[in-house]
Image: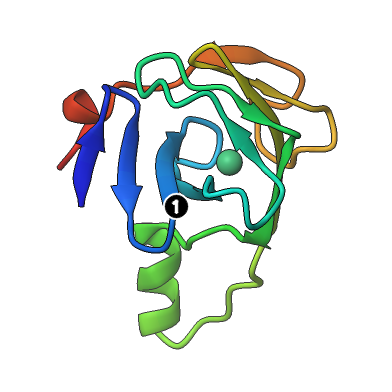
Amino acid sequence: MSAVGSKLRMLEGGKVAFLCPGCRQMHHVTVDGSRGWTFNGDGDRPTFSPSLLVKGTVPITDDEHATIMAGGKIEAKRLVCHSFVTDGRIRFLTDSSHKLAGQTVDLPDLSANQA
Ligand SMILES: [Zn+2]
C-alpha cells in the first residue's frame, strides 16, 4: 500500500481507503470508474461522488470479546454508515447508525492514526 496525500491509502484493484471517524475502521472506495464513483484525485482534500453506503456489523469491543471468551453471548450490532466525502470532510447522513450521524467532520489524517 502506498499513501495518497494525508487522508487516503491506495489499495490494489483501483481502490482507495480512508479512516472513517464514525466507524473507526477503514472504508474502501473503488475509484477507477468501474463502480460508478468519481474521485477528484486529491489525497489531502478528497471528494467522492455519489454518497458512500457501508453496511455490516460493528466490530466487537475488547469487553465483548472477553464476554465471548468467558462463554457469554454477544449480539452483533448492525452498522450503517452513509456519508458524503467532500473536500477532505465527511458528512454523515442521519441514517448512519453511529454517533456521528448528522454531523460533518474532517477526515482523520492517516499518518497520525496509523498504529
Ligand atoms: Zn463509516
Front-most of 69 and 103?
A: 103
Q: Residue at x 83, y 28 (%)?
A: 94
Quarter, ligand 1: top right
Q: Amino acid at mark 1?
A: Lys
Q: Residues within 10 Å of mark 1 (few under 14, many from 20)?
A: some
Q: Is residue 54 above or below residue 23?
A: below
- The image quarter containing residue 96 is top right
Q: Residue at x 63, y 35 (%)?
A: 38
Q: Is residue 96 above or below residue 35?
A: above
Q: Is residue 86 above or below residue 58?
A: above
**The furthest residue to the bottom:** 71
Residue 4, horizontal then vertical, whole percent? 28, 32
Residue 30, horizontal then vertical, whole percent? 54, 51
- The image quarter containing residue 83 is top right
Count every numbered label the image shows and give the total: 1
Q: Could you tell me which secondary element the residue under label 1 belongs to?
A: strand
Q: Is residue 12 above or below residue 66?
A: above
Q: Residue at x 45, y 88 (%)?
A: 71
Disc 1 C-beta below 8 A from ligand 1: no
- Residue that numbered label 1 is attached to: 15
Q: Quadrant of the C terminus?
A: top left
* Residue 2 shown left or right of residue 23 in the figure: left
Front-most of 40 and 20?
A: 40
Q: Residue at x 37, y 22 (%)?
A: 108
Front-most of 106 and 37?
A: 37
* Residue 84 shown left or right of residue 67 in the figure: right
Residue 72, horizontal then vertical, whole percent? 51, 82
Residue 92, horizontal then vertical, whole percent? 70, 26
**The furthest residue to the front:** 33
